[in-house]
Image (cartoon, rainbow, N blue to C red):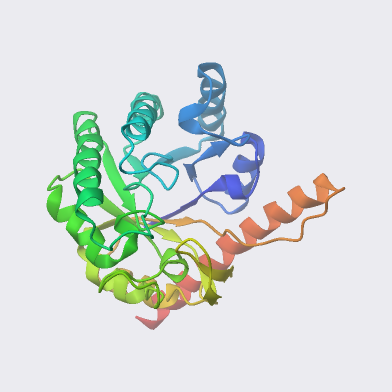
Amino acid sequence: MYYTGFADEAAVGVAGQIEATKALGWKNIESRAIDGVNLHDLSDEAFEKTAEAFDAAGIQINCFGSAVANWGWDPIREEDFLKTREQLKRALVRMKRLNCKMIRAMSFKAQWNRPAFDPEVEENVFRKVAELVHMCEDADVLYLHENCNNYGGMSWKHTLKLLDKIPSPNLKLVFDTGNPVLNYDRSEGDELKNIQDSFVFYRNVREFIAYVHIKDARYLGPGDNGFARAEFTFPGEGDGHVREIVADLLRNGYDGGFSMEPHMKLVFHEENAEQNARERMENYIEYGRRFMKLVEEVKASL
């Protein structure tokens, strides 16, 4: 078992991301954005400087936090598929340089205004994700699907159907503990009525989980565009069943990574960028420390 995180939530630049990781005593980062640009979209020069900085610091990028097939891409638009396929091509080349074997990816934007199991959407999602997964097979990389605002994130049944339609050893899951709190449950049909239950989702997909994102949130009520309103919290303080999920994972021998993704709201000081940066860093470090404490408490109770 090891700890890691989206260190771009601690700092925008490479130096700050390394600083936060070392402050927590960790040796891994799930790299997503450097100076606001995803790792697969950096210029070649900027990417190489980033890779060299992590190498020099002894920090390993354990997972590539890509935007491949995420909520920004429509499942039906071929133009969107071609663009995100190019993202994956660039990512795979860069992952080889980084000696990174896992990529966080998704299953295209959830279509909340269409039937829960829409045939046209499903035909496109299954065909396109299958091609992306096969690209990862060829590169000996795991395509880790995240339960987010995408087809597979609409319910645990959608995730299982995706896995069933794309039977590949290179398609596994990264389970996000907090995302179910933000998304309505479409497992039984079209109505946007009930929020997902994180533990129920987890329990139904547990055998396919290779990696875990730690996020927590408190449900506040209905929102817009298929999302619920929620307030992000420290791990174990929201409705994400973080403690119960961690306990069940460890009880069943989970030995993979726990990746921090706080998403917590901080006070924004419009005229004080230095204070913003400090609070961002402090929040990330506090989040990591609280989660490590939670893990130790869970271990002691098993």
Q: Position of residue 230 (x, y in %)?
A: 56, 70
Residue at x 42%, y 66% (from the top left corner): 183
Q: Where is residue 241 in the image (x, y as percent from the top left)?
A: 42, 76
Question: Between residues 125 and 65, which one lies in front from this camera angle?
Answer: 125
The quarter of the image holding the N terminus is bottom left
Q: Against 93, is 187 above or below?
A: below
Question: Between residues 171 and 224, which one lies in front from this camera angle?
Answer: 224
The tally of labels here is 0
Q: Position of residue 158 (x, y in %)?
A: 24, 61
Question: Between residues 23 and 185, which one lies in front from this camera angle?
Answer: 185
Residue most toward the top?
45
The quarter of the image holding the C terminus is bottom left
Residue 184 visible (yes or no): yes
Q: Against 5, is 99 above or below?
A: above
Residue at x 14%, y 45% (from the top left corner): 168
Does 96 sit left or right of 233 as displayed? left
Does 184 sit left or right of 161 as displayed? right
Residue most toward the bottom?
301
Residue 293 visible (yes or no): no
Residue most toward the right?
271
The quadrant where residue 75 appears: top left
Residue at x 39%, y 30% (from the top left corner): 87
Q: Against 198, is 141 above or below?
A: above
Q: Where is residue 121 in the image (x, y as percent from the top left)?
A: 26, 50
Question: Between residues 41 and 6, which one lies in front from this camera angle?
Answer: 41
